[in-house]
Image: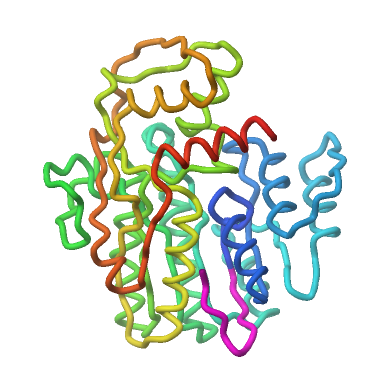
């Protein structure tokens, strides 16, 4: 994946205990680099999951004895996970002073910013909190990059910025001025403000638009994981709409390949500001997604039919021509194989 460099690099990864972040850190450590992980172990879902993600990412497979207190568990995690190559900080990106102390104590070659409040539907209920984390928190990082002379930055954007675009597939040059959720709007804002920091402060930047990432360690609130869990327990699944909504589902290994190739690109080039789609270029509708999970579990879902939810887009479809040409991106996990791998992981965990 990531081409080995002659010298060890020092990467700061925000959200490194989450789904995508933990896989990325695992890859970076395997390639001989040093990683600083900043994560606030948000209560969006159980912090137990993030602790397990963290331990897996650093190849620490001893049983973790959870207590009844979140702070105690996280401090225990920090004490057993620190090494010469890996540092974990229990830190919220909204706290600029807390972030500043981390930047002061480390030499950082590149920031990979994955931390965010995620989810379309929750953002409609809590828009101001999404603004605080996804916009102000990101700006805190850019301000510190400016202050500490860090000139390389990779940022997670989202396919949500395309809204209900009638054009398909979605191309990076498409107009994205009509998002339909606060979450999508914060991601679009991050792209625009990122260009400001690139232009004013010469921070090389790649904004990666992720398209519906799935695979081992996927968040339990996301559809593939949620459906798999509920079907396996013979419980009803919430089925929104008529099943024709469609997504460009992207397997986690392909996303990590895209991120690591973006790292190599930004390290090898100067005066960079790029927006890049990372998708699978294979559109799967909700009915097909469900039937694929059913087939792999050998069980039939019990559906609770519900109306479409505000903020949900009808379809996503990534044009990955630019990613292939610019960074050599080459996704190779089709949806059927990806679901097979995910279900195998789910049944083991």
Q: Is residue 237 above or below residue 101?
A: above
Q: Is residue 236 above or below residue 69?
A: above
Q: Is residue 6 magenta?
A: yes
Magenta part of the chain: 1-12
Left or right: 320, with 20 as reference point: left
Task: Using the rendered view, name the quadrant where residue 94 is placed.
Answer: bottom right
Q: Position of residue 85 (x, y in %)?
A: 74, 73
Residue in the image at 54% along x and 38% along y: 342
Q: Is residue 194 magenta?
A: no
Residue in the image at 57% along x and 61% along y: 24
Using the image as rendered, state which of residue 155 and residue 189 is in the foreground.
155
Task: Using the rendered view, name the quadrant where residue 59 is placed.
Answer: bottom right
Q: Position of residue 189 (x, y in %)?
A: 31, 58
Q: Position of residue 258 (x, y in %)?
A: 42, 63
Q: Position of residue 203 (x, y in %)?
A: 40, 81
Q: Main secondary structure of the magenta part?
A: loop
Left or right: 283, with 21 as reference point: left
Residue in the image at 78% along x and 46% along y: 71
Residue in the image at 26% along x and 29% along y: 245
Using the image as rendered, state which of residue 2 and residue 340 is in the foreground.
340
Q: Is residue 177 above or below residue 226?
A: below
């Amino acid at each position: 994946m990531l081409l080995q460099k002659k010298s060890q690099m020092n990467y700061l990864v925000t959200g490194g205990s989450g789904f995508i972040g933990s896989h990325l850190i695992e890859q970076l450590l395997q390639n001989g680099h040093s990683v600083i992980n900043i994560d606030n172990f948000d209560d969006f879902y159980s912090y137990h999951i993030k602790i397990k993600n963290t331990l897996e990412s650093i190849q620490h497979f001893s049983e973790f004895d959870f207590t009844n207190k979140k702070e105690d568990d996280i401090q225990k995690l920090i004490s057993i996970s620190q090494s010469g190559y890996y540092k974990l900080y229990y830190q919220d990106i909204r706290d600029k002073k807390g972030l500043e102390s981390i930047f002061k104590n480390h030499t950082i070659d590149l920031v990979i910013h994955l931390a965010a409040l995620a989810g379309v539907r929750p953002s409609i209920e809590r828009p101001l909190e999404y603004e605080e984390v996804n916009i102000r928190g990101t700006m805190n990082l850019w301000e510190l990059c400016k202050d500490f002379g860090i000139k390389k930055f990779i940022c997670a954007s989202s396919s949500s910025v395309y809204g209900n675009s009638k054009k398909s597939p979605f191309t990076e040059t498409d107009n994205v001025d009509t998002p339909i959720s606060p979450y999508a709007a914060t991601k679009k804002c991050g792209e625009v403000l990122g260009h400001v920091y690139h232009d004013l402060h010469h921070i090389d930047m790649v904004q990666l638009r992720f398209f519906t990432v799935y695979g081992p360690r996927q968040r339990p609130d996301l559809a593939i994981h949620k459906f798999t869990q509920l079907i396996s327990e013979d419980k009803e699944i919430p089925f929104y709409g008529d099943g024709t909504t469609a997504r460009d589902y992207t397997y986690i290994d392909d996303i990590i390949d895209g991120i690591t190739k973006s790292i190599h690109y930004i390290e090898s080039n100067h005066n960079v500001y790029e927006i890049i789609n990372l998708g699978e270029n294979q559109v799967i509708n909700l009915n097909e997604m469900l039937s694929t999970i059913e087939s792999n579990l050998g069980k039939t879902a019990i559906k609770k039919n519900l109306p479409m939810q505000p903020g949900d887009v009808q379809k996503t479809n990534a044009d990955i021509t630019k990613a292939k040409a610019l960074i050599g991106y080459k996704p190779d996990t089709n949806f059927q194989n990806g679901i097979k791998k995910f279900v195998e992981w789910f049944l083991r965990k």
